[in-house]
Amino acid sequence: MELWVPGSRLDRVGDDRIRPDWVRGLWDADGARLLRVGPDARLPVDPDGVPRFEPTGGELDEQHVFLVGLVDGAGFFAVDSPTIAEPSAPARPLVTALDDTGRDLVITALALVNWHRVAPHCGFCGGDTVVRQGGHVRHCLACARDRFPRTDPAVITAIIDADDRLLLAHNTTWDADRMSLVAGFVDAGESLEACVRRETFEEVGVRLGEVRYVGSQPWPFPRSLMLGFVARALTPDIRVDGVEIDRAAFLSRDDFDAMLADGRLVVPATASISASMISLWRAGELAI
């Protein structure tokens, strides 16, 4: 099941971006566009509130400008900008209003910029690195190793009990009415399924039976890859950890609709995999 941007027209041109002359040709071509990524993942926006991709111009700075890919034959680039012109807005809510191609472009641009911000030195020898392959590789000048973008895997799980109720939890850092699925980062040496079971038991005290993969979503805030699962709760008993999660409940579809209607429940934004999986459960399409 493909939950993330199935209609995207972004071509990542993995075979072509290794050629510097080809990348420079894209930069100079008519229709090429550049997205500036500011501090705290803020993006410049047009008057209608969508991210502003400006025309490229001047000489390509290959060490600071990164090729996102092609859309309908035109090159799209990203750059880390210490300041950006107003108006601007945080990227996280912006992606909700974009189509699949727009989401793919913005999320990929953020992922590249966030990686380059923290990767000027080689993770093996500490030497200086230079940008290659249009921004998708950093090459170490000291030990000649290539470094690739870092992604942190995290699981997010739709937990369903024997009555087909969905478990929603409230994180202590969220607004009072917001609830979502249980999620957490994968430990070193841990399988995805083991992480699903561990995070669920640690956060809400629920033991799981069957666990099934659903889909994935990149989430570069700053560099996560969210891996979605659906799992069967062996019992409906809940025991929150009181630190990360302070309340949780299994909700029927009637409970869910009533709480959503009267404002007692706020669910994640539509661009997130959590919202997609909640919607699948609500429609009766998330079986386990």
Image (cartoon, rainbow, N blue to C red):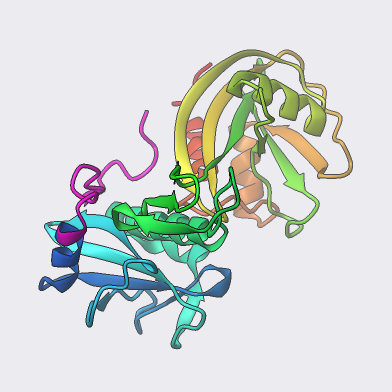
Identified at 55% across, 50% down, the residue is 122
Q: Where in the figure is residue 153, as x and y percent of width and height?
A: 57, 36
Between residues 199 and 237, which one lies in front from this camera angle?
Answer: 199
Question: What's the residue at 50%, 83% (across, down)?
Answer: 83
Which residue is rendered at x = 58% and y = 46% of the image? 123
Where does the image place residue 39, in percent across and percent down from the top left?
A: 55, 74
Start-end of magenta stretch: 1-21
Residue 92, how many percent across, how many down? 51, 62
**Quadrant containing the N terminus in the rendered view:** top left
**Residue 59 sits in quarter:** bottom left
Q: Is residue 107 above or below residue 209?
A: below
Q: Is residue 45 above or below residue 109?
A: below
Q: Nearer the viewer, residue 89 or 25?
A: 25
Q: Which residue appears farthest toward the bottom when viewing the image?
A: 86
Task: Work out which residue is located at the far front of the displayed protein and give it.
Answer: 142
Relative placement, left or right, of 96 versus 199 is left
Residue placed most toward the observer, 125 or 25: 125
Q: Residue furthest right?
A: 242
As drawn, is 183 to the left or to the right of 9? right
Q: Determine the residue positioned at 64% across, 38% down.
A: 181
Please give left or right for residue 19 compared with residue 187 in the image. left
- Predominant secondary structure in magenta? loop
Image spot of residue 178 (x, y percent): 68, 53
User: Picture quarter containing residue 135?
Assistant: bottom left
Q: Is residue 13 rendered magenta in the image?
A: yes
Residue 4 in magenta stretch: yes
